[in-house]
Image: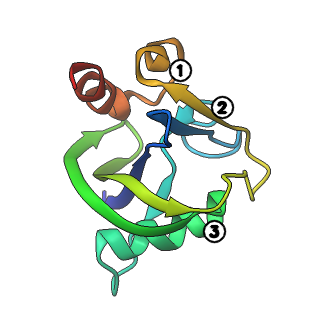
Amino acid sequence: MKRIHVAVGVIFNDLNQILLAKRPDNLHQGGKWEFPGGKVENDETTSEALIRELKEEVNLNVISTMPLMTISHDYPDKQVLLDIHSVKDFSGEAEGLEGQPITWAYIEALKDYDFPEANTPIIEKLLSL
């Protein structure tokens, strides 16, 4: 099974809230909330992939990203390598360009959302900041 390299953005707004997007029901882990991002293509750095994906998915113009952590997680049907970056330097208003619901949530409220299992270490890290 091939491990899928995913660029993940933990996007902070001026109120120190984090942007969440809901995965479409027809996708792996569908119906759960996630930190926006997407697959890293062969010719891209994680930061380049994240900048591209955040423009395509949530209409944000990202100026820079900072590495936060990396998680390797095995689901029964899929293996993922999550390359997580924090994003504080961006412009634009977030909107779900693929029809997905999005919301800004305070860090303390993250535990109230249903996330894919692979996201648990990200939430634990954010709650400890």
Identify the colour scheme used. rainbow
**Rounded to the nearest whole Å, what is the CA distance between mark 1 and mark 3?**
24 Å
Q: Nearer the viewer, mark 2 or mark 3?
A: 3
What residue appears at the point 63 percent right and 68 percent down from the top-left corner?
Answer: 56
Give amino acid for label 2.
Answer: Gly
* SS under mark 3: helix
- In the rendered structure, the answer to whether residue 73 lies left or right of residue 110 reads left
For residue 2, which quarter of the picture? bottom left
Residue situated in front as seen by the camera: 73 or 19:
19
Q: Are marks 1 and 2 in contact (CB under 8 Å)?
A: yes
Of callouts 2 and 3, which one flags the residue occurring earlier in the amino acid sequence?
2
Mark 2 crowdedness (10 Å alpha carbons): few <14, some 14-19, many ≥20: some
Provide the residue designation for mark 3: 56
The residue at the far bottom in this view is 43
**Rounded to the nearest whole Å, what is the CA distance between mark 1 and mark 2?**
9 Å
User: Where 120 sits versus 74, above or below?
Assistant: above
Provide the residue designation for mark 1: 114
Give amino acid for label 3.
Answer: Glu
Q: Nearer the viewer, mark 1 or mark 3?
A: 3
Provide the residue designation for mark 2: 31
What residue appears at the point 65 percent right and 31 percent down from the top-left corner?
Answer: 31
User: Where 53 sits versus 73, above or below?
Assistant: below
User: Where 95 sits versus 20, above or below?
Assistant: below
